[in-house]
Amino acid sequence: MKIIICEDERELDIKAAEEFANHIRRKPDSVLGLATGSTPIGMYKQLVDMHKNEGLDFSRVITFNLDEYVGIPHDHPCSYHAYMDENLFNHVNISRENINIPNGLAESLEEECTNYEEKIKSVGGIDIQVLGIGRNAHIGFNEPGTPFHSITSVVELTPSTREANSRFFDSIDEVPTHAISMGIKTIMQAKKIILLAKGADKADAMYKALYGPITPDVPASVLQLHPNVTVFVDKEAAAKFPTKE
């Protein structure tokens, strides 16, 4: 595991985007695993700038998002379909047919989950997966206690996660109670993983994830078992890391 401690959010955004962009340049038909939430927004902005100013080409990439809420329309401003359009897809030359986001409105959610897994496999798996981390160390919407062998499924969101995400909605009552999420096994099958963390409120989760015991109670701790993980963290989120002698 490679850990890169950045001075601030801007440095983190730039370095993470460079890592992502270099992968796309090396493999123009890369399969990208994408995350939502507030943490990756700056990285996506940098990627958009690279597309506009440096010609970073998204025309052949295939994307799979980690998750989507169950029960809200794709054009709802808080859906992850809308988030991805606003922060990345509407601003780069990606082919719409290559975009994959779970359909939380599917008639059969179970079938949607099965098909999502199969589609990832059909393109050879995810080349590079970006992750954020929740305050309770969840990755995707895999909450504490999620088995490490889990695959894409419908998950119930914990009160703490709904509370954290309520800042994007008018009230917590509007936050969906369920989501479709890639499972931990699905995430771990990515060839490379990039983990992003910003802010003092993520310091405890990051310490437990990287330096604590590997346990389903700390979902992100499973990343210690992955052979190719790069962590981009700002100083605040790295505040509890062991100091080097």
Image (cartoon, rainbow, N blue to C red):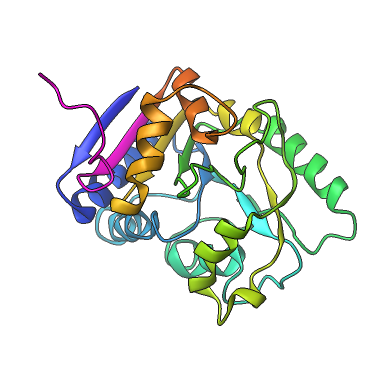
Q: Residue at x 10, y 18 (%)?
A: 245
| Outermost residue to the bottom | 170
Q: Is residue 232 magenta?
A: yes
- Residue 6 found in image quarter: top left
In the shown orientation, is residue 4 left or right of residue 47? left
- Residue 235 found in image quarter: top left
Residue nearest the observer in this picture, 162 or 227: 162
In the shown orientation, is residue 227 left or right of residue 96? left
- Residue 191: x %, y % from top left: 51, 25
Q: Magenta region, mostly helix, strand or loop?
A: loop
- Residue 35: x %, y % from top left: 50, 50
| Outermost residue to the left | 245
Determine if residue 100 is in view. Answer: no
In the shown orientation, is residue 225 left or right of residue 184? left
Q: How many circles with numbers are drawn on the protein?
A: 0
Q: Is residue 51 above or below residue 191?
A: below
Magenta extent:
230-245
| Quadrant location of the N terminus in the rendered image | top left
- Residue 219: x %, y % from top left: 55, 34
Q: Is residue 10 magenta?
A: no
- Residue 142: x %, y % from top left: 62, 42
Residue nearest the observer in this picture, 244 or 48: 244
Q: Is residue 183 above or below residue 108?
A: above
Q: Residue at x 24, y 47 (%)?
A: 12
Q: Residue at x 74, y 62 (%)?
A: 70
